[in-house]
Image (cartoon, rainbow, N blue to C red):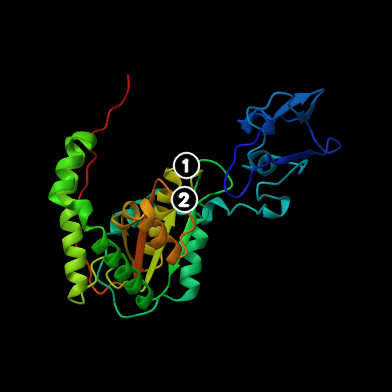
Amino acid sequence: MAIPTTRAKEKGDIRIDQEICIGCGDCVEVCKDFSLVLRDGKADLSNNPAFGCIGCGHCMAMCPTGAIQITGRTISPGDLFELPATDTAAGYDQVINLFRRRRSIREFRDKTVEPEIIQKILDAAVTSPMGLPPSDVNVLVLDSKEKTRRFAADFCDFLEKMRWFVSPFFLTLMRPFWGKANDEMFRGFVKPMFDIFIGCMGNGINVVTYDAPLAMYFYGSPFTDPADPIVAATTAMYAGESLGLGTCMLGSVHPMIQYGGSGRRFREHHGIKYSSREGVIVIFGYPSVEYRKGIRRTFASTTIMN
């Protein structure tokens, strides 16, 4: 039985041209579904795959003679392309400098992000690794300041109707069920967030999406690996930085619109197809500020196992 996603319920179809197979075994080595074996010196289909071909395409991309073709699960031989030459790829110094230059930007010039730049960001984000192909990441693109502001205003209206969620009575009632850490988070962050978002929007100030000229909301589906939307959003964020844009991840909207009838109606109104465990908004724009220094960050802990 194939592993299901919203885009594919069937397993991939593996076809092997044994006339041109040289029996190198590379395809067998890279197939972690155990769908392939060497039999009589040629690649062949296994009788005992783990799940059935998931359509990762590793075997097809690895084969030196083109003897393997995969179709199904949104993949086909036509999706293959030549890898860029090694000397055209960024080295570590370039990558780490890109990472170090990026800071969260919430102040933008009144300038539209060009459609070709938006497409480049999406082209980069779609290369992100995923837990299971085909990708079940969905992207909502808000490509103007007017759209990001309208989205933010609708979200504040949504929060206004949900104020009971952060009322003292409800927080006291829920504390024994969701524990001390969640209670501290709701009292110290979520409740003030309601007050700030709604209050500022009432005064004409948008601190939800900061009137960014571009926002992308990355979210999954009930089948999605929870990490996938976050990984894709991170790739998009660094792509934006490489293109001269300021970027910032916004995590406040996603968890609030996942549950209940109000959340469902908000999603439907904005064309958001699914509720999902994880999701995040990235805002982009030409920055109106310039930072002169970086700030060194640390992990909570780093443990090297013996």
- Determine the image quadrant of residue 177: top left
- Determine the image quadrant of residue 51: top right
Residue 187, x across and y down, in percent: 14, 48
Residue topped by disc 1:
225
Residue 48, x across and y down, in percent: 70, 23
Kindly state the secondary structure of the residue where label 2 is placed. Answer: loop
Res 220 label: 2
In the displayed orientation, state which residue is furthest to the top: 306
Q: Give the camera-side residue of 39 and 12.
A: 12
Residue 157, x across and y down, in percent: 28, 67
Kindly state the secondary structure of the residue where label 1 is placed. Answer: loop
Residue visible at 27% across and 66% down? Answer: 156
Q: CA distance from mark 1 to mark 2?
A: 8 Å
Residue visible at 21% across and 77% down? Answer: 204
Residue visible at 18% across and 38% down? Answer: 175
- Determine the image quadrant of residue 250: bottom left
Tell me the quarter of the image containing the C terminus.
top left
In the displayed orientation, state which residue is furthest to the right: 19
Amino acid under disc 2: Gly
Residue visible at 35% across and 57% down? Answer: 98
Mark 2, Cα crowd under 10 Å, few <14 / some 14-19 / many 20+, is many
Amino acid under disc 1: Asp
Horizontally, is 199 left or right of 249 in the view?
A: left
**Disc 1 to disc 2: CB gap under 8 Å:** yes
Residue 65, x across and y down, in percent: 76, 42
